[in-house]
Amino acid sequence: MKFLSSLFAFTACGFLAAPVFAAEQAPEPSGCAAKRQDIATRIEDAKAAGNTDQQAGLQKALSELNANCTDVDVVKQQEQKVLDAKREVSRRQADLNKAMSKGDPEKIDKRKDKLAESRKELQDEQEKLEKVQPDEDDE
């Protein structure tokens, strides 16, 4: 009897865990699909809160998104953000180099911190770009 209860418990855990593993494997939407999903979620929240004005505004935003959004546009926008972040890293590096030539330790530390921030922002933007770019396998 003990064996059967253990077997039942093990089987039940397996069935309960299956949806969790399936959810982890499902790819997250990107680009326009992600924006649509975000707006749809916000529309549902507005409905639940009874906020008809917000709901109407979000419906309009969704209509405009459906009419105008292409994944190519989203990729181009993200590429521009990456380019801007690269320029910021270059500017911060130049600031650090200038501070180092002057030899002021306080300014050097500040410039190093700012450069590290800019590099982190660049990395974040590059990761976002990877998410919105179509997979090479799909083409």
Image (spheres, rainbow, N blue to C red):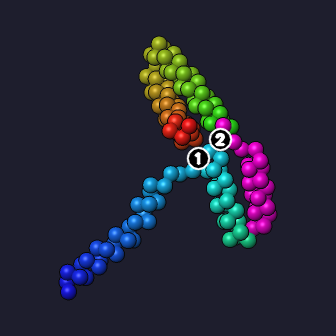
User: Which quadrant would the C terminus be assigned to in this image?
Assistant: top right
Residue type of the residue flagged with mark 1? Ser
User: Residue drawn 63% across and 31% down?
Assistant: 80
Where 88 sits versus 23, above or below?
above
Residue pointed to by mark 2:
71
Q: Position of residue 35 (x, y in %)?
A: 65, 50
SS for callout 1: loop
Where on the picture, by quarter, is residue 16? bottom left
Q: Residue at the far top: name it.
A: 101
User: Residue drawn 46% across and 23% down?
Assistant: 108
* Nearest to N terminus: mark 2 or mark 1: 1
Q: Is residue 88 visible?
A: no
* Residue 30 - label: 1
Task: Please tell me whether residue 63 belongs to the stretch shown in magenta.
Answer: yes
Q: Which residues are magenta?
A: 51-72
Task: Please tell me whether residue 129 belongs to the stretch shown in magenta.
Answer: no
Other residues around mark 2 within 10 Å, as few (<14) / some (14–19) / many (≥20): some
Where on the picture, by quarter, is residue 81? top right
From mark 2 to mark 1, how far is it between C-alphas? 8 Å
* Residue 105 - label: none
